[in-house]
């Protein structure tokens, strides 16, 4: 709506301007007139280019290009009869010989409220009283000049209505006489100057001055009565000076002062009672102190009834006295960010009952007193990120009844109390990203190590954001998914299973009724497992749920589809097997419990396998069926003597589909556990598997295959591609048959820790056998581990 209005207004304005431009375009032999939004005149005056821009009644901008002298009398008449403008500006033009008034009259301007004179190059000549004579209506003046070393004391005599004066210059001496005529001055800004020593009465006549800025003026010293007489000053900016001390009574006369800005100075200490008389003080901004200001004086911001905002950042503060904010109960925002604070005294915020925002980020806090925040019942935002907190007591946030934003990123937290949020019922955004949280507790009970898992968010509902990214979680907790949060970020952890337990009916209902809106899951070692695919598909089946980083999960597209294909295949296998009653009975006897469970499930159910009893190095041997005899005779017997290796064979047939199916089938079924692949890579294998594939792709595929060992065996017809690949092999992941110590190397490589990014999973080390030879598929199915029955269920419900 507002946008629409804006568009209409600007269109109307543009139209008006265009009309005005057409009407107004002055004709002058030296100038070419144009412009659409405003009148634009390009003039050539005695070879000097002058560009004039104007909007009638509003502004005239005169810009000189490369001009050191200019005959101002030759400027065009921009307004036909004398008219008044709000502002006139000269950019990079030389000083006129006569007054600005004459120049303006000559151009058809009778009156202007503001005059801006900017010149980035050294001026030739000096400012003089005559330049401003006749401009008695002027209220604003900006002089931004270089190289002027002197402004005469009487310069402003004729422009005593000035309320706003801004002088930017790199070297002028300002005398007290200069400002004397400017009795109505309300805003004075002096910047980019060298004023190492300001005389004490410089501003004493400016009794209406409300805003004073001495920004970047190299004031390193001033007397303690610099501000005497400046009674109504409300805003003071002394930033970017070289100040290293302040007289204790410097601000004493300023009993109307509301805002003080003091950044980029060099204070090594501040006097006590600095703001004792500034009862109206509302805002103090104290940033980027160039030297370390270790301590703040006692009671610095105390007893200031109107104080609202305090920003003290990047100033090297280490110690904050307990009473620094005492009795200032209207404070709403405090930032002490980017300092070196290690400890905050317990009563420091005792009187800040109106505090809304507290930023303590980028300090060195190791601990928080449990009562530190006990008065802050209105606090909405708390930032404790980038500190060194390693523990946080359960009561710490219990008084923060209004908290809606909590940032604890980049600390060293390993554990947090389960009661931490028991009092906070707001719709919070909570981030614990970049800590070392696991939510696991290890205890020695009866001489065995037991791992207890808990979630401090069990009773925290409807969060706007729960950010647990970049921690050390190995598991997810059910409540993260089902407590009605809007966004969940669990990326960058060690999570293998998105959903740990089976989904019960009530969880299922909650997931459908209160779905998450956004979930981030990338950078977890999820290994493209079916159960994760199915869970993600289930989440995504809800129209409001999005997984923005799903593309970062590098699973081939088929990996998801195969989960469903697998289901169909398994069903057909089941049917085949079903004809063999005996087998079914054996199957039933072996898996009575799981099948019973399976039948009970009405809905989607997944299972838990991270703490499965089977912990083994499983080895899948892949080979061309032409090499079968070799594998059966030479490879299997030796490997089977190693008890900690469980062998599973997968012959490759000619048909590519069958091959990829068997691969995917075994992957999906088995990567519930970790496994390694041993490829019997021979010319035969090359032909069966890669007959149509480009050599570069084969090479890349071999290099990229994780947890895979290629054994080069020269069986089959001579093949130059094979010879090349053998020659270029990566010796870390491949071995040549009949190499010295061949079997030791093979077994070493097979028992090496399974590559699992940085996550230290407890899986995948011990014993387990499957045989997955396509010829024995029924048998292999009978030996599938129990959890697959749940998987099967999951599939059934996933499809529903
Ligand atoms: C300005 O004038 C000087 C010498 O007259 C010349 O070297 C320079 O290129 C000019 N600069 C521009 C931007 O015209
Ligand atoms: C300027 O022109 C406008 C209309 O064109 C007229 O109303 C106004 O009185 C003129 N002003 C002077 C000072 O002549
Ligand atoms: C301005 O004048 C100063 C000294 O008078 C000189 O050092 C400087 O180079 C001049 N700058 C320009 C841009 O002419
Ligand atoms: C400014 O004042 C200082 C000391 O009062 C003096 O040394 C310096 O020469 C003066 N500079 C100019 C440009 O007048
Ligand atoms: C301020 O003074 C320092 C040395 O005292 C000088 O290097 C710096 O250029 C000065 N800054 C300005 C803006 O004059
Ligand atoms: C600044 O000027 C005052 C008097 O004008 C003088 O007493 C004081 O010593 C000067 N300080 C510095 C640092 O030059
Ligand atoms: C706070 O105010 C009370 C009463 O106004 C006063 O007694 C007390 O000393 C003050 N505390 C501080 C630290 O100034
Ligand atoms: C002070 O904190 C409140 C609450 O977070 C916030 O809305 C407001 O913008 C903050 N004020 C300033 C000046 O930053
Ligand atoms: C430890 O073992 C004993 C005997 O087996 C049993 O009674 C006791 O409950 C166990 N304690 C725990 C904490 O499990
Ligand atoms: C979680 O925190 C990390 C670190 O600040 C950030 O990069 C990420 O974007 C956050 N996630 C969400 C969903 O805001």
Image (spheres, rainbow, N blue to C red):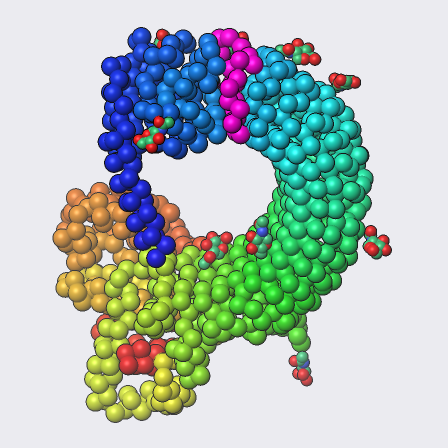
**Where 348 sits versus 786, above or below?**
above
Of 243 and 442, nearer the camera is: 243
Q: How many labels does the image show?
A: 0
Residue 496 drawn at (x, y percent)? 43, 65
Q: Residue at x 46, y 64 (%)?
A: 488
Q: Which residue is drawn at 65% across and 28% down?
A: 183
Q: Which quarter shows the C terminus?
A: bottom left
In the rendered structure, the answer to whether residue 229 lies left or right of residue 706 reads right
Residue 293 drawn at (x, y percent)? 72, 36
Q: Which residue is drawn at 47% across and 73% down?
A: 484
Please say whether residue 351 is visible from this viewpoint: yes
Of 87 and 579, nearer the camera is: 87
Residue 712 drawn at (x, y percent)? 27, 51
Q: Is residue 167 found inside the magenta-colored segment of the image?
A: no
Q: Is residue 139 found inside the magenta-colored segment of the image?
A: yes
The range drawn in magenta is 119-145
Q: Residue at x 38, y 47 (%)?
A: 732
In the rendered structure, the answer to whether residue 601 lies left or right of residue 222 reads left
Residue 510 drawn at (x, y percent)? 43, 79
Of 529 and 438, nearer the camera is: 438
**Where 482 sits versus 140, above or below?**
below
In the rendered structure, the answer to whether residue 606 lies left or right of residue 221 reads left
Give the quadrant of residue 373: bottom right
Quadrant where ligand 1 appears: top left
């Amino acid at each position: 709506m507002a946008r629409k209005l804006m568009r209409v207004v600007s269109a109307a304005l543009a139209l008006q301007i265009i009309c005005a431009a057409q009407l107004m375009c002055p004709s002058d032999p030296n100038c070419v007139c144009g412009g659409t939004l405003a009148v634009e005149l390009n003039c050539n005056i005695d070879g000097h280019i002058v560009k004039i821009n104007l909007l009638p009644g509003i502004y005239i901008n005169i810009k000189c290009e490369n001009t050191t002298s200019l005959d101002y009398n030759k400027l065009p008449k921009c307004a036909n009869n004398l008219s008044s403008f709000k502002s006139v500006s000269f950019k990079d033009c030389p000083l006129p010989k006569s007054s600005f008034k004459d120049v303006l009259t000559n151009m058809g301007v009778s009156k202007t409220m503001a005059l801006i004179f900017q010149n980035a190059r050294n001026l030739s000549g000096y400012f003089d009283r005559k330049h401003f004579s006749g401009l008695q209506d002027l209220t604003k003046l900006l002089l931004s000049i270089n190289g002027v070393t002197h402004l005469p004391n009487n310069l402003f005599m004729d422009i005593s209505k000035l309320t706003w004066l801004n002088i930017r210059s790199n070297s002028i001496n300002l005398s007290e006489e200069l400002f004397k005529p400017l009795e109505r001055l309300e805003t004075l800004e002096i910047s980019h100057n060298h004023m190492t020593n300001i005389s004490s009465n410089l501003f004493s006549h400016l009794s209406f001055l409300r805003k004073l800025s001495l920004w970047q003026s190299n004031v390193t010293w001033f007397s303690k009565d610099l501000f005497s007489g400046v009674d109504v000053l409300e805003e003071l900016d002394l930033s970017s000076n070289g100040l290293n001390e302040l007289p204790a009574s410097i601000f004493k006369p300023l009993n109307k002062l509301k805002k003080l800005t003091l950044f980029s100075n060099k204070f090594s200490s501040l006097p006590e009672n600095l703001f004792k008389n500034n009862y109206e003080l509302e805002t103090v901004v104290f940033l980027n102190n160039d030297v370390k200001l270790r301590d703040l004086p006692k009671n610095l911001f105390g007893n200031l009834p109107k104080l609202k905002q305090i920003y003290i950042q990047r100033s090297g503060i280490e110690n904050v006295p307990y009473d620094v904010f005492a009795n200032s109960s209207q404070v709403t925002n405090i930032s002490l960010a980017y300092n070196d604070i290690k400890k905050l005294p317990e009563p420091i915020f005792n009187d800040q009952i109106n505090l809304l925002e507290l930023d303590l980020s980028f300090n060195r806090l190791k601990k928080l007193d449990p009562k530190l925040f006990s008065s802050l019942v209105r606090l909405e935002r708390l930032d404790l990120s980038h500190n060194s907190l390693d523990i946080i007591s359960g009561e710490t946030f219990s008084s923060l009844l209004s908290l809606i934003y909590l940032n604890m990123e980049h600390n060293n937290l390993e554990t947090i109390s389960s009661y931490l949020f028991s009092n906070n019922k707001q719709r919070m955004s909570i981030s614990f990203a970049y800590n070392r949280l696991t939510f696991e507790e290890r205890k020695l009970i009866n001489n065995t190590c037991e791992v207890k898992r808990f979630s401090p968010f069990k009773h925290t509902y409807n969060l706007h954001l729960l950010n647990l990214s970049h921690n050390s979680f190995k598991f997810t907790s059910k409540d993260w998914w089902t407590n009605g949060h809007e966004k969940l970020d669990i990326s960058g952890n060690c999570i293998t299973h998105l959903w740990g337990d089976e989904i019960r009916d009530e969880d299922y209902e909650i997931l459908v009724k209160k779905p998450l809106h956004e979930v981030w899951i990338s950078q977890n070692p999820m290994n493209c497992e079916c159960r994760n695919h199915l869970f993600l598909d289930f989440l995504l089946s809800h129209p409001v749920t999005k997984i923005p980083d799903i593309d970062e999960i590098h699973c081939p597209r088929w990996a998801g589809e195969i989960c469903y294909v697998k289901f169909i295949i398994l069903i057909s296998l089941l049917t085949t097997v079903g004809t063999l009653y005996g087998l079914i009975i054996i199957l039933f006897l072996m898996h009575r419990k799981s099948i019973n469970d399976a039948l009970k499930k009405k809905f989607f159910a997944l299972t838990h396998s991270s703490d499965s009893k089977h912990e083994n190095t499983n080895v899948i041997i892949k080979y061309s069926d032409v090499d079968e005899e070799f594998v059966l005779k030479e490879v299997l017997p030796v490997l089977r003597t190693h008890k900690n290796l469980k062998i599973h064979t997968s012959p490759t047939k000619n048909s590519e589909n069958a091959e990829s199916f068997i691969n995917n089938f075994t992957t999906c079924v088995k990567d519930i556990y970790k496994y390694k692949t041993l490829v019997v890579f021979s010319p035969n294998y090359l032909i069966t598997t890669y007959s149509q594939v480009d050599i570069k792709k084969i090479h890349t595929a071999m290099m990229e295959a994780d947890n895979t060992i290629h054994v080069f065996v020269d069986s089959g017809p001579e093949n130059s591609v094979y010879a090349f690949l053998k020659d270029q092999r990566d010796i870390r992941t491949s071995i040549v048959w009949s190499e010295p110590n061949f079997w030791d190397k093979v077994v070493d490589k097979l028992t090496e820790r399974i590559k699992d990014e940085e996550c230290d999973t407890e899986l995948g080390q011990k014993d387990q056998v499957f045989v997955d030879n396509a010829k024995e598929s029924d048998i292999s199915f009978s030996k599938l581990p129990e959890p697959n029955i749940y998987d099967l269920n999951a599939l059934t419900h996933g499809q529903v």
